[in-house]
Image (tube, rainbow, N blue to C red):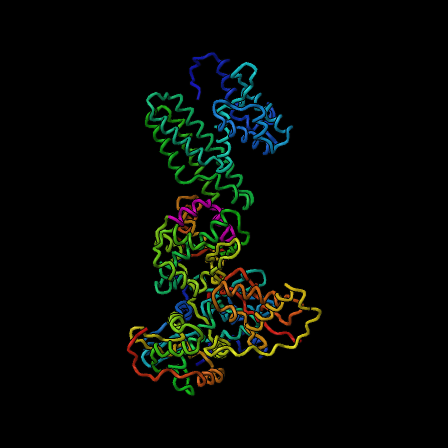
Amino acid sequence: MPDDAPSLDDALVGEAVLGVYRQMFAALARDSGAVVDDPELVDVAETLLAAFADAGEDGLSREQMRYVCRRYPTETFENRLRVLKGLGAVREVFPKPNQLRYRASFTSVVGLMFVRRMMLDGGQSEMHRLLALEQLNVADPRMTPAQARDGADGLARAFRLWSVELLTLTNGTIEELREQAPKLWGTEEIMQRAERLHGAILRRWPQLDRTCTDLRAAIYAYGDASRRAAARLSDSAGTTRNLTLLPPETWRTFARTASRDELAAVLDAFVFDAPAPWHEPSAIVTAVEDGPKATPPRPAPPRPATPDPGLSADTGGDAAATERLREVAEQVLRGRDRVAVEDVLDQDWTTARRVLADLTSAHAHPELPYRLTWSDGMAARPQGSPTWVSPGVFERTAP
Amino acid sequence: MTDLYEPLLRPYDEKRRAELVAAFTAVEHAAEPVAELRYPALREPALRRVLGEMLALQGRVLIRARPKEWTSGYHDDVAAALAADPACVPPAEERAVLALVLIHSVAIPRASGLLDDDSWLSPHPTPLEELRRRSQLPIGELEAALRRLRNAGLVGQVKAGGDDAGGYVPGPQFHRLTAGARRRLQEELILAAGPDSPLAAAIRARRRGRTAPPADPSRDRERTP
Amino acid sequence: MTPDEHHVDPQVLARARARVLGAPSQPAADPVPPGLTAASDGDRVWLLPAWPDGATPALLEEYDTAPMPLDRAGQARRVLAAALRCCWTRPDDAPWPSGDAQVTDVLEVYAGMSRGDADLARRWATGELRRLADTGWLLVDETAGTVRTGPRTALWHEDTLASLRDLLRRLPAPPASRPEAAAP
């Protein structure tokens, strides 16, 4: 922050400040006078800046720049380069006479990092950083009261603007609030940091009490706005939708670090049904009669005399495949006319899936007299587990 | 034995009575919510009310799981009373695994924008590897807990296949939570994983406000048994 | 939300509790809450649901509605059949309560019913016996190595048992019930 006492030539300072502004936001500039209207234009700038970072002190030639930006149209590239040069984000250097090279400005990269972070969390982490920085500043013996006041005023403004935005959202639609609130509302940690900072400023410079009162009011207003937004969300309809209010990383961290008891506590007020499968006497009889037998399986039953229209041996692969499906089907039926899919799949899953695939093909085969039917209520899920297979029947159709 | 349901069923003719009993059996025992279309007693509001009264005798309520589909579950007050008895709550090792499955299969996909339905069921399996390698659960108890959870229909197993690594998803019992229980589950997870979040603060504040006065102002009370 | 604020009827609570716990048991002398089916073996009484008009979950089948999924249902039922063959020794009586049978006998009968590796079959059957015991279909005393029918079999209707009795008569008998030296 510029010192209150102007020790440098004002014009020079002004120009320097504007120079930093220009470089910081060059990546977002559409031309020297306006911000981009297409996010792709920022991507071009980012691609270029990354290439400059890799290139080291030699910088890049114009051809090299064009090459790294080859997936963008020439016109877009030229336009970007012109703007970036105009704002000082990319400079021309002449390492040797007649050799034109380009270098990038460090400030623009920092500006872009800042912008990307803001897009991710709407300024939460920036606020953390600012608060931590100000806390360090307050402890710095060189810090003047005027600098401290500027810092506190800036934070108070940020908190007030945040509050206004949150309150506006809180009065809007629940969907928008749910989407935006996590970027805007304050965690308890931010509030605590802000209050600690406020206390530190007041202790060192009691004369800043008015500034501090303002800051405290802004912190409270922000805390209040956060609570209101959270209360509206926690009252909202929906029984899983608020899970989105914690970022995936928070969930993952909890899942990976929580102890067994911490995890178990989540469900310690829930009751569920005990497993109570029903075994109807007739189902027991069926299971035994249809189950694998100790005695060798009956010899293959006489094939139903289904006509084999138009299929001759020389159709090769197709006929063989059809025959294979017929064999699988007959093995499964073992002389019966119908069999429960559930029991057919009662074996290791790899085999079961193969059998299921074959039964499905047999069902779909226009020349084979088999049908696979699933009862309603549950979808057939060949990719799923046998547990989830709905009751189905594989049967011989009337010839 | 005097039939508990007789006073409720007596006014109905044989056909209606059979319809009521069929619908009762279906919502109480089917794996998935059952369609109104198939059960006339679920379709007709008057019979549906009787069904609700039959379920209330068991401490249960009718739950509309999806439009025109119904199941049953414990009434919130009954569940709260039962949960006070440690014998009625699943053991810690099962609850811990189940909480992890809910986080990986529902919370994370939800927070990543991958889930549309407002449901505790999910097509996103929790990989066994995740439970085994990247959680604090003692490995020795993991397999046994998963087996018991599967037997109880609290988790379902999705076998590996194609691009899918397979794993575990919340089981059909999660259809049977009332809206109140589902909301409470969401809150418990948020309190556990993000105790510092403004939302957790709001949940705590609301619960304090609710327990202090004896009257319960919640809007979604279902019929008390 | 303290539970007692909502005055849940204790009888209703007892029925819900029985569902949460499966088939809880209590000393036979304790009063059985109304609206439950009581299955007593003399010493203890098991609390089971009482369904309207006696409708069992088998009714779902008539409506093509899937029951709760059950892994390896066929295997579970075959092991249950093997166990019934051993402990339901007088099939003309009701299945509940039955006398004790040796777990080893049940495993032998099951191995005799299945194809392939008999050791493997015994191991599978041991796991199933445990599951059947967990769900109240059998009562297994693991230390004594004995098994008898579970209280849930008391929910079977007499008129649904004919084919099961017939099956049990056809199943091979357990090896002469002498005490086995080796436990599984």
Q: Is residue C36 visible?
A: no
Q: Judge left or right: residue A311 versus residue A250.
A: right
Q: Position of residue A142 (x, y in %)?
A: 34, 20
Q: Judge left or right: residue A72 versus residue A214.
A: right
Q: Position of residue A145 (x, y in %)?
A: 37, 21
Q: Is residue A290 visible?
A: yes
Name the one closer to the observer, A38 or A389: A389
Q: Position of residue A198 (x, y in %)?
A: 37, 31
Q: Judge left or right: residue A114 versus residue A33.
A: left
Quarter of the figure with the N terminus of chain C? bottom left
The residue sitting at 36% across, 28% down in the picture is A136
All told, the count of numbered labels is 0
Q: Position of residue B222 (x, y in %)?
A: 49, 62
Instruction: Examine the structure image and report whether residue A143 is included in the region drawn in magenta.
Output: no
* Whether residue B146 is situated above or below residue A262 in the rendered picture: below
Quarter of the figure with the C terminus of chain C? bottom left
Instruction: Examine the structure image and report whether residue A249 is included in the region drawn in magenta.
Output: yes
Name the one closer to the observer, B73 or A299: A299
Name the one closer to the observer, C112 or B133: C112
Tell me which secondary structure the magenta stretch mostly adopts.
helix
Residues drawn in magenta: A231-256
Image quarter for residue B101?
A: bottom left
* Whether residue A21 is situated above or below residue B210 in the rendered picture: above
The residue sitting at 55% across, 17% down in the picture is A99
Find the residue positioned furthest to the top: A9
Image quarter for residue A267?
A: bottom left
The residue sitting at 54% across, 31% down in the picture is A47
